[in-house]
Amino acid sequence: MNRIVYLNGQWLPEAEAKVSIFDRGYVFGDAIYEVTAVAQGKLMDYPGHAARLKRSIGEIALESPVGDDELLAIHREIVARNALEEGLIYLQISRGPADRDFHYPEAPVPTLSLFTQAKKFLVDGPAVINGIKVISLPDLRWGRRDIKTVQLLYPSMAKMEAEKRGAADAWLYEDGFVTEATSSTAHIVTADGRLITRQLSHAILPGITRGSILDLARANGITVEERAFTLEEAKSAAEAMITSATQMVQPVVQIDDTVIGSGKPGPVTMRLREIYRDFHMAHLI
Ligand code: PLP
């Protein structure tokens, strides 16, 4: 790979972008991130991602090293410099380098980095055509999952466990209720076509795709219920799906040993995928 990346105001070949070993992102996982999808060389659902980034920065008491206009300009420039047609932009802000101390440094100099990753997500691949299988695992992450921090070791462990058991992903549960998937929002559909999605709280990340899907579902006459659902309810649902920026809407056809509905991607799921893609492809910036 020979990407051009962004690091603290500089555009650099990826091999030349270096961050201090004292960076608090490296030592403490003291960093937040954001992922924005790119389609046709433009940004998808960007305002939502920019707003969540601002929120994450505020929740860890940092200040953004760049303003709103500059942030958008950087996103556009990284797409252009890498001639990225389809894929994602990863952005990370850490509290920057400091002597190792649990206290935040008084005058932090945040590290801001962005890179691109090519990924085909617009055309329906096998995961969409056939649906995916997930396993269930206890949610052992920390209690502020609403902040998009880089502390992703447990989700990685869960993904590896899923792979080991022949599944594509894991749905995490707490007190019997599904929280979310390792890197996406979990949803189910009832036999009478209602879309059930866990309500926002500290237990889950406020998925930008989640918010958009709920708005689009309501606008298209699909009844939405924002409430927690148990693993048992999920297993007896008519349909199940996950949503995220770079997966959009993806059908889930098996949870553990239980086949969901007909075992094929459900009609509400596929309709939502189409509605989401059509809407956001028409609103790229
Ligand atoms: N939940 C978790 C834990 C995630 O990591 C992600 C995406 O990375 C999501 C949900 C979906 O968020 P979004 O729709 O903003 O991509």
Image: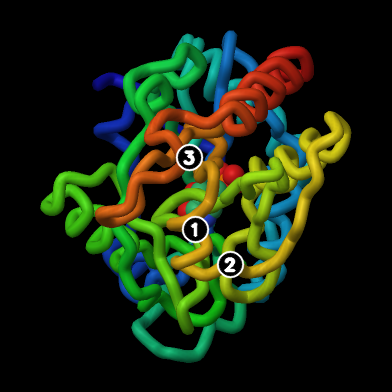
Instruction: Left or right? Give the position of 190 relative to 284.
Output: left
Label 1 crowd bin: few (<14), some (14–19), many (20+), radius 10 Å: many
The yes-or-no answer for disc 1 within 8 Å of ligand 1 is: no
Q: CA distance from mark 3 to mark 1?
A: 31 Å
Residue 229 is tagged as 2
Asked if residue 206 lies left or right of residue 110, the reply is right
- Quadrant of residue 60 within the rendered picture: bottom right
Q: Which mark is residue 285?
A: none
Q: Quick check: marks 3 and 1 in contact, CB under 8 Å?
A: no
Secondary structure under the numbered disc 2 in the rendered image:
loop
Query: Which percent across, then down, holds residue 14?
Result: 31, 31
Q: Pointer 2 and pointer 1: residues touching (CB < 8 Å)? A: yes
Query: Could you say which disc has been placed on residue 90 in the image?
Result: 3
Please identify the quadrant where the C terminus is shown: top right
Residue 15 located left or right of residue 116: left
The mark that comes first in sequence, 3 or 2, is 3
Q: How many marks?
A: 3
Q: Which residue is found at the position 66% from the left and 46% from the top? A: 210
Amino acid under disc 2: Phe
Above or below: residue 268 compared with residue 34: above
Residue 12 appearing in the image: no
Q: Residue at x 67, y 54 (%)?
A: 196
Going from N to C along the chain, the mark reached first, 2 or 1, is 2
Tag 1: amino acid: Ala
| Residue, disc 1 | 234
Q: Quadrant of the N terminus?
A: top left
